[in-house]
Image (cartoon, rainbow, N blue to C red):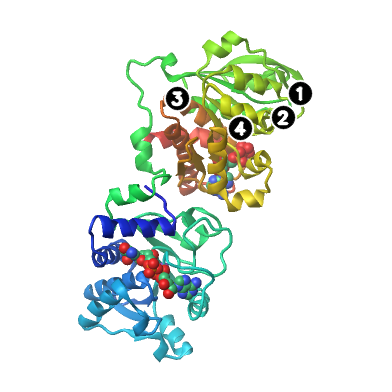
């Protein structure tokens, strides 16, 4: 499913109308009817009053179709036109006229006192927000500037059309004032701001409805940003053949752990096994072997020499790097007190996929110039702090520009970048971006990233195409947290090891 900016959506609309010949009146009719179909289950009783707030543009035009459809179905609807009648133009005007010719009444905001307007809104159970859509520019102006905070204070169920009014549709860092929706029904394509914070918090629960814009129009304009959905996972997750053997599912090497971080290698290894890796070897510093090995029975071990309780040299021979492993994950719990020169050797000598996480990313900064010329694919899995360190920016800058900075970095260094956080983004070396919809704050706990690394490693070995492998790992990781929190686990109490334990039930759904 394509994710677009407001500008891209506008161009898509234009393509559908001008190149394909669909009438804008028809698209607006489709939009209004699809919106109503989507919200009907939310409207409990026909006696509950609904107010539709209509703005000056085409978002307001959708509001007229919605109002007409709800009235035809027997709902009690107050239809509020906020601008003066004569300001409504084009397709919105057409649908306003159709609405009026059906014999329905329009309440014009300018004919009421502000107090009376608010009093009438207070008597409604549901407010439909068709004030402003993707056409908003700059700071809110009157009377929206006054109406929007007042609506937020009413504490009613607010359902926004396309996006909460006042919110920009692109990557936004600050929100001045916008409708705080309970639900948002987005038309055709989710807008980018639905996946950036704090804008996401204004959307409430998000649904997407099809309004009949042909796929060709969407692909012509925007084919580089997508939501990775359950359907995509079902389509791409590897299927085990009855005749397969352990060698068919990849031989993984995990380089992880140190004397003081013995849990990380355990979590990464178990997660890798749980997602179907055929064989896993865990390379750990000799000083951590006893503790780590006592917790893992499925893996084999490779012992590295240590200094300061951390890996100093992996002692992996050229032949081992050439023939023995199909992919390597390096970084969870390796510490930062040595030179990390073994990472440079891996980057240059290992010609297959490498996943670099956690402290591995810390060492990577020293050898970053080797990425471009690597023989195999490189997958980096930083959180905002690790990414900020890699690119010499502040965490705030990263969090405000997640899409643009990760795209720039992935293209510049020729890597797959999985930028963690709510709505993790996977960016390919060519700059395509795939947004993960699963996961919740239960994941904000030490060790959950180590689990993800093992999952990415397992799937990268089992799928030819790396982007689906990486996105599937992020999806299933988040899904594990979602299943736990919807089945009696408080987000406070979910452990990283619970994610590994629940994985069989997660996979059972796909
Ligand atoms: N064009 C199409 O084919 C379709 C468009 N649709 C709807 O149309 C919307 C986009 O329509 P528009 O481009 O008319 O945009 P809006 O409905 O967001 O209205 C834009 C207008 O609002 C006013 N405005 C802009 N910024 C403002 C600010 N900061 N403060 C106060 N007023 C401001 C200006 O008068 C501007 O012309 C979409 O969000 C969607 O709901 C749907 O009807 C489906 C079809
Ligand atoms: N609020 C949140 N909502 C959704 N996912 C989250 C949230 N906070 C963290 N996560 C996810 O949890 C994981 C944390 O990884 P990371 O910070 O590397 O943990 P650690 O290094 O402690 O194992 C990532 O996959 C991240 O996307
Ligand atoms: K809106």
Residue pointed to by mark 3: 276
CA gap between label 2 and label 4 equals: 12 Å
**Mark whose residue sits in front, 1 or 4:** 4
Between 501 and 426, which is closer to the camera in this rendering?
426
Q: CA distance from mark 2 to mark 1?
A: 9 Å
> Against 194, is 67 above or below?
below
Marking on residue 235? none
Q: Is mark 4 within 8 Å of ligand 2?
A: yes
Q: Position of residue 179 (x, y in %)?
A: 48, 69
Q: Residue at label 1?
A: 309
Q: Earlier in the sequence, mark 1 or mark 4?
A: 1
Disc 2, SS: loop
Q: Nearer the viewer, mark 2 or mark 1?
A: 2
Q: Residue at x 63, y 13 (%)?
A: 316
Instruction: Give the image quadrant in which the ligand numbered 3 is located.
Output: bottom left
Within the image, what quadrant is residue 157 found in? Answer: bottom left
Residue 140: image x %, image y %? Answer: 52, 73
Dot 4 falls on a residue whose secondary structure is loop
Give whichever of 413, 424 is nearer the camera: 413
Q: Residue at horizontal 28%, vertical 85%?
A: 105
């Amino acid at each position: 499913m394509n994710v677009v900016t407001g500008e891209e959506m506008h161009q898509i609309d234009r393509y559908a109308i001008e190149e394909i010949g669909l009438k804008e009146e028809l698209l607006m009719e489709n939009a209004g009817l699809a919106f109503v179909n989507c919200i009907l289950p939310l409207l409990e009783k026909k006696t509950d009053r609904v107010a539709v707030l209509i703005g000056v543009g085409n978002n307001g035009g959708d509001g007229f179709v919605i109002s007409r459809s709800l009235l035809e179905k027997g709902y009690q609807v107050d239809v509020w036109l906020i601008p003066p009648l004569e300001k409504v133009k084009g397709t919105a005007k057409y649908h306003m006229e159709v609405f009026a010719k059906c014999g329905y009444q329009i309440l014009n905001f300018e004919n009421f006192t502000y107090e009376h307007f608010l009093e009438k809104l207070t008597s409604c159970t549901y407010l439909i927000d068709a004030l402003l859509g993707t056409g908003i520019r700059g700071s809110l102006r009157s009377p929206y500037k006054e109406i929007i905070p007042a609506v937020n204070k009413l504490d009613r169920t607010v359902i926004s059309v396309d996006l909460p009014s006042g919110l920009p549709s692109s990557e936004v860092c600050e929100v001045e004032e916008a409708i705080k929706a309970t639900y948002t029904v987005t038309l055709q394509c989710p807008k980018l701001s639905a996946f950036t914070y704090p804008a996401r918090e204004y959307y409430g629960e998000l649904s997407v409805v099809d309004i009949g814009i042909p796929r060709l129009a969407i692909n012509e304009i925007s084919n580089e940003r997508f939501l990775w959905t359950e359907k995509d996972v079902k389509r791409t997750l590897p299927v085990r053949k009855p005749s397969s053997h352990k060698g068919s599912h990849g031989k993984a090497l995990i380089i992880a752990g140190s004397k003081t971080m013995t849990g990380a290698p355990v979590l990464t290894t178990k997660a890798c096994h749980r997602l179907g890796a055929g064989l896993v070897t865990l390379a750990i510093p000799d000083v951590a072997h006893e503790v780590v090995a006592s917790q893992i029975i499925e893996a084999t071990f490779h012992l590295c020499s240590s200094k300061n309780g951390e890996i100093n040299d992996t002692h992996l021979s050229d032949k081992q790097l050439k023939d023995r492993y199909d992919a390597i994950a390096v970084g969870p719990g390796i510490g930062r007190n040595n030179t990390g020169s073994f990472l440079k050797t891996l980057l240059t000598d290992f010609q297959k996929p490498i996943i670099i996480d956690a402290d591995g990313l810390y060492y990577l900064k020293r050898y970053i110039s080797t990425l471009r010329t690597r023989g195999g694919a490189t997958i980096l899995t930083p959180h905002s702090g690790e990414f900020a360190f890699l690119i010499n920016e502040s965490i705030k800058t990263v969090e405000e520009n997640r899409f643009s900075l990760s795209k720039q970095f992935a293209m510049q260094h020729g890597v797959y970048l999985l930028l963690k956080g709510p709505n993790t983004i996977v960016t390919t070396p060519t700059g395509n971006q795939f947004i993960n919809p699963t996961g919740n704050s239960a994941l904000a706990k030490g060790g959950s990233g180590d689990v993800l690394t093992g999952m990415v490693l397992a799937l990268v070995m089992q799928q030819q195409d790396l982007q689906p492998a990486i996105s599937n790992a992020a999806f299933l990781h988040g899904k594990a947290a979602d299943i736990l929190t919807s089945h009696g686990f408080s987000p406070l109490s979910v452990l990283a090891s619970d994610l590994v334990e629940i994985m069989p039930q997660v996979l059972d759904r796909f």
